[in-house]
Amino acid sequence: MAEIELGVTADLHVHLRDGPMMELITPTVKQGGVSIAYVMPNLVPPVTTIERVSKYREDLEKLCPDTRFLMTFYLSKELTEDLVAGAASKGYIHGIKCYPAGVTTNSKYGVDPNDFTSFYPIFRVMEKEGLILNIHGEKPGIKNESADENEDIHVLNAEPKFLPALRKLHEDFPKLKIVLEHCTTRDAIELIRDLNKGTGPQDEVYVAGTITAHHLSLTIDNWAGNPINFCKPVAKFPRDMRALVDAATSGERWFFFGSDSAPHPIEAKSTHVGVCAGVYTQSHAISYVAEVFDQQGKLENISKFVGSNGISFYGLKNVAKTDERAWLVQRENTVPEVIANNQGLKVVPFKAGEKLNWTVEWR
Amino acid sequence: MAEIELGVTADLHVHLRDGPMMELITPTVKQGGVSIAYVMPNLVPPVTTIERVSKYREDLEKLCPDTRFLMTFYLSKELTEDLVAGAASKGYIHGIKCYPAGVTTNSKYGVDPNDFTSFYPIFRVMEKEGLILNIHGEKPGIKNESADENEDIHVLNAEPKFLPALRKLHEDFPKLKIVLEHCTTRDAIELIRDLNKGTGPQDEVYVAGTITAHHLSLTIDNWAGNPINFCKPVAKFPRDMRALVDAATSGERWFFFGSDSAPHPIEAKSTHVGVCAGVYTQSHAISYVAEVFDQQGKLENISKFVGSNGISFYGLKNVAKTDERAWLVQRENTVPEVIANNQGLKVVPFKAGEKLNWTVEWR
């Protein structure tokens, strides 16, 4: 039976929500094979104060004391330079998440990516303090009557249309650590590689891309007619999926795992209008990834993708909460039809009912 | 109050189903402003015999004696040249519908578009008898491990990928009347125009495209997360929608209305996996179209699109069942949230709950 030691693993983009959903989902971080989880702040209202971020971390730690939770602020006009500097120096946050307004779940408090300059004072503090800027890289659609095709923004080009803003930001802040979250296009992969062209083996990486588990095996045809696979950014074309798989399995230091696991109650997915965007993968996170690496014959690189690449980018050596280490074990592992509590809350996981070939053990 | 006489109107692509759904939906053909409806044969099993086609028409006429129902066979290996010639000469059918296998609702009995030649004997009979060949123009996706991007078939390029087969068919049967049903791409519009380049004002049209009501106002962003707007072929990009609007409102004789109204019970739309493809527009068919023509300032061409162009292509002069004529009247017209019977069957119409500005009256 094949076994691979993964060591300390990191999922650098998780949604754990609050209330009953948080209670149901938080323990599944460890079940899914993850030692360190970087927790997104898109609650209602968004997390923008030290009080809320520490209370949120305490709540999560109570539910799952073995997992290291890293916290983040939601980039908004409520943040001040002093607040950010204080939160960083005291270790309350590891980064700040930037949502363009209106592109995904609870993003209405987000920013206009055409106006990043108003946040430049904050970015300067982040650069100095070594905070990570995590970007949801989609350009919001603008309703207009223009007949100019180049002006069209839609779910398939929103990420490519955002990329020039990322390039500009890196030019303006070359030492700011930036993550393009949940890359979904070949264009995004090419840009991350391009921006790291001069990065030598010993050099610090400043711009990286996270890739989810589900985008490694979904294309547009999988979510057309299957709301359970609908997320933002949406899965794109087969050529894009191939580029993501190539990047994830490459071992390159600027690509690492951020599941963007985003649980919704089944009622929010089984509806004829207004389906919530998000795919829930947390409970089997590493197993989904292993499936793809195995198919590609690249299991030798999986611990870089789900461990060392992200841990090193975030500067997270020795932050695991326990001495347990994750092992990937080749053993049949059936995804349940539903993850539920006994009050009727039900979340349907990615690939519900399907058999995976790898499971994670803690030793 | 603005009024426009539409005269005899035609919807040259309708799905009326069977059983309770047929009973609920068939009367809405007239409510939606349509005199003549061409009824698709994708029942289970598909309609491929004279007995079934005449029984089906009788059932429909009982439900709605004022509507002229035109019937069609489902192209499959069960059809023989004699059967088709007999059905045509006795007026049982006006055309034959061709579904590529596996692309939409009940299409598993369909044909492989890479192998049209096996149907050439049937097409020869159709050409001779003046039957219409109605094509669902999508190339079925082929699961393969190819890394060649040009081999990828997905919901967004399935129609463009099919177009060379249409061009070939027209070359091989220049006098066969072919309709590319429910055009959704700029590529399709351009091909139909290209194939009619030499068609003079008095010449017979041999290749035409139908356009639905919903594709005149939907793009991919409207069905991403809204299963009620999910249909096959899926709505594409803004540039495609603009091309469809331009074609429909142009008055050109090779573009006319085929709603592809496709009712499903709400349970088949409100589900997290396996949403049925189809948008139901029948009850407000002409009003949806009028909305778009009005916005474009092209109401002077609407009677061509919903009437004379299709009627002339199909050779349908004087087949209206009654002396009533459709009038478009500018009057607020709210789409109901649901069309239902008293046994719990519910269909959610397109733009449910929205206010339209035009209604149809029969005079």
Image (cartoon, coloured by chain):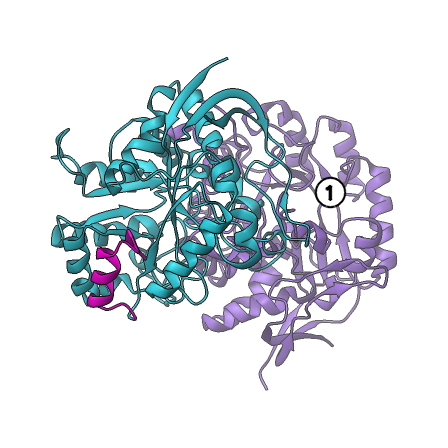
Chain colours: A purple, B cyan
Q: Position of residue B293 (x, y in %)?
A: 41, 24
Q: Position of residue A119 (x, y in %)?
A: 64, 26
Instruction: Say which residue appears at 53% left-offset and 47% top-offset.
Output: B25
Kind of residue sitting beneath label 1: Pro
**A168 or B275: nearer the viewer:** B275
Q: Which residues are magenta?
A: B78-97
Q: Residues within 10 Å of mark 1 (few under 14, many from 20)?
A: many
**B359 or A43: nearer the viewer:** B359
Q: Position of residue A132 (x, y in %)?
A: 65, 42
Q: Residue furthest top?
A: B1
Q: Is residue B79 magenta?
A: yes
Residue to which mark 1 is pinned:
A41
Secondary structure found at label 1: loop
Above-or-below relation of B335 to B264: above
Circle 1 marks a residue in which chain? A
Q: Residue furthest bottom?
A: A1
Q: Quadrant of residue A242?
A: bottom left
